[in-house]
Amino acid sequence: MGKLHIVGFGPGDLKNMTFWAKDAIDKSDVIIGYETYIELLAPYIQGKEVYETGMTEEIDRAIFAIKKAKDGKVVSLVSSGDAGIYGMAALVFEVLLESGWKVGDDPEVEVIPGVTAANACAALVGSPLSLDFAVISMSDLLVPWEIIEKRIRTAAMGDFVIVIYNPKSKKRNWQLTRARDIIMEFRDPLTPVAIVKSAFREGQSVKFTTLKDLGDDSILGMLATVIIGNSTTFIKNGIMLTPRGYSTKYEVKLK
Ligand code: SAH
């Protein structure tokens, strides 16, 4: 029986890859992924059967990976971050379930979790996600904008820290400022914001700004994640922090 690993390999570097992800990749005969991911993994997949595809070929990539595993191969379909978070796992299961596949059938499928962009980026700025947070993608390719807008509004209303994936691209140029305006209906314009580009990859950069100024930073793009604080989040001495609330109950001084 073939085996299909759906591997989240983290934000990009080896130290953020789980042992399980590395092990699955090591054990695979075939590696399939979007070209940028294959480039990132190049040092670890030498000598394997490797297939790179373009960004818009996700359905073909999923079908191809399933076919290879059905041929009896050990396959890793690789996604950055976590493959179950805006990644390839859902698509693979959609294709499989559509064909009548069920757990126990050929191929065996395993989803291997990875460090997603949200907590990778958060780690680079301090601890902004210490309490309830919501992740919202600005991509309206598959989700209608009205639904995205509803989610932005309700997350803002609920005082969630908001993490924004896919904030901006050449074509996606107004969604982030629209999101900012909605959030400002509920939140202080001076709410701290972090923009992290290419976390744990070449070209990594971090910028702090405020909600009212969010929108035009040059590091915004498809490789950036935006973290918008809640009503208690602050930036101090280079650290973005959403305090857990201990200091309201206990003394948190260094002794
Ligand atoms: N499956 C991925 C998310 C894919 S959606 C994960 O779990 O991380 C793609 C979006 O993720 C990008 O537009 C960007 O907002 C964010 N992203 C992915 N990798 C990133 C990185 N290394 N640094 C900053 N943001 C990243």
Image: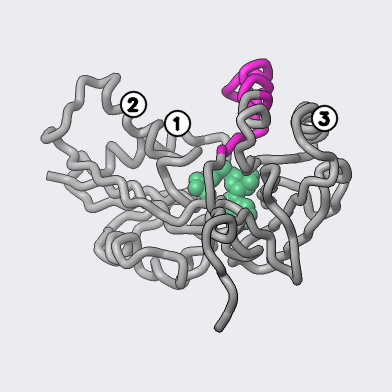
For the point 57% across and 39% down, the residue is 135
Cα separation, mark 1 vs mark 3, equals 35 Å
Cα separation, mark 3 vs mark 2, equals 38 Å
Residue 165 in view (yes/no): no
Please rate how many residues cluster around mark 1, counting C-alpha atoms within 10 Å: few if below 14, some from 14 to 19, many from 20: some
> Nearest the camera: 133 or 15?
133
Which residue bears the numbered disc 3?
A: 181
Cα separation, mark 1 vs mark 2, equals 8 Å
For the point 69% across and 66% down, the residue is 239
Up the image or down, 7 lies above or below 239; here it is: above
Segment tinted magenta in the rendering? 134-153
For the point 85% across and 53% down, the residue is 218
Q: Position of residue 76 (x, y in %)?
A: 33, 52
Queried on whether the Cβ of the residue with tag 2 lies below 8 angstroms from ligand 1, the answer reads no
Queried on whether the Cβ of the residue with tag 3 lies below 8 angstroms from ligand 1, the answer reads no
Q: Secondary structure at mark 3?
A: helix
Q: Position of residue 125 (x, y in %)?
A: 66, 63
Residue type (three-letter) at the residue carrying disc 3: Asp
Which residue bears the numbered disc 2?
A: 95
Residue type (three-letter) at the residue carrying disc 1: Ile
Which numbered disc flags the more N-terminal residue, 1 or 2? 1
For the point 74% across and 69% down, the residue is 238
Question: Is 145 inside the magenta-drawn segment?
Answer: yes
- Give the image quarter of residue 103: top left
Which residue bears the numbered disc 1?
A: 59
- Give the image quarter of residue 126: bottom right
Task: Give the position of the N terminus as an image quadrant.
Answer: top left
Viewer-nearest of discs 1 and 3: 3
